[in-house]
Amino acid sequence: MATIESMTELLVDQLKDIYDAENRLTKAIPKLAKKAANEDLRSALEDHLQETKGHVSRLEQAFRMLGEKPKAKPCPGMKGIIDEGNEHVGEDYEDDDLRDAVIIGSAQRVEHYEIAAYGTAIAHARTLRQDEVADVLAQTLEEEKAADLKLTEIAESVVNIEAAHGGEMEEEEQRPQRRSNGRRQASGRQRATAASRSNGRGRRR
Ligand SMILES: [Fe+2]
Ligand SMILES: [Fe+2]
């Protein structure tokens, strides 16, 4: 393995990693979208697939700005997140809403990984005064954040509620527990998707 000797090389190395991750996602997102029962969720994933193809193009642009040819370097992190997501989504679920809740959780893990990766690459590009590169990557970062927020909204407005109501939640509904703010106590399943709700909103549980 070659030694990374400069910040520029480090940035290029990171771009290779993200390039691999984004390319993997162009194949992984359609599979998730296909399994989604909720229409809003499916169309959010399909929209983000189109954006993801744009992310690949922007990375190619960033490589060229740095005088490099676009090249991928295997990203075991994203590979692992995708494998884990496929495994969870492939389990048997009593109803589609439960699977949708899992799809959202898997997709948000992907988005958070991307947000972290782009955040670092942008910071390094700014340090190198490669502002054009940073600006191109920042456009993608905004789309990743928006995709994450959209998933949170879908989870809050539809999927988690339906998933909870389909199961043991019904029993709890007959004897609702109330907290001081008037919100009903979350069920186990709602707690399981609490990350979805807190993402992007900074709400603490
Ligand atoms: Fe992306
Ligand atoms: Fe993304």
Image (cartoon, rainbow, N blue to C red):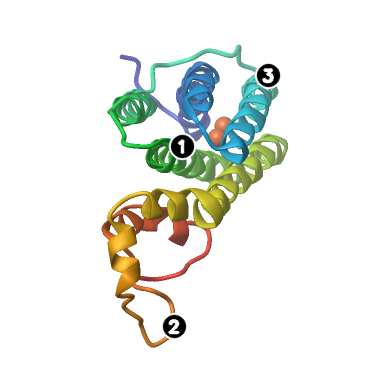
Q: Which residue is mark 2?
A: 182
The x, y position of residue 113, in whole percent, is: 43, 39
Residue type of the residue flagged with mark 3: Arg
Frontmost residue, 53 versus 181? 181
Question: How far separated are the C-alphas under marks 3 and 1?
Answer: 29 Å
The x, y position of residue 202, in whole percent, is: 48, 67
On the image, which quarter does residue 4 sit in? top left
Frontmost residue, 19 versus 30? 30
Q: What is the number of callouts on the image? A: 3
Q: Which residue is mark 3?
A: 64
Residue 180 vs residue 175: left or right? right
Mark 3 vs mark 2: in front: 2
Name above or below for residue 81 compared with residue 119: above
Residue drawn at 54 percent across, 20 percent down: 30
* The N terminus sits in image quarter: top left
Q: What element does badge 2 sit on? A: loop
Q: Which residue is mark 1?
A: 107
Residue type of the residue flagged with mark 1: Ala
Residue type of the residue flagged with mark 2: Gly
The x, y position of residue 82, in whole percent, is: 38, 26
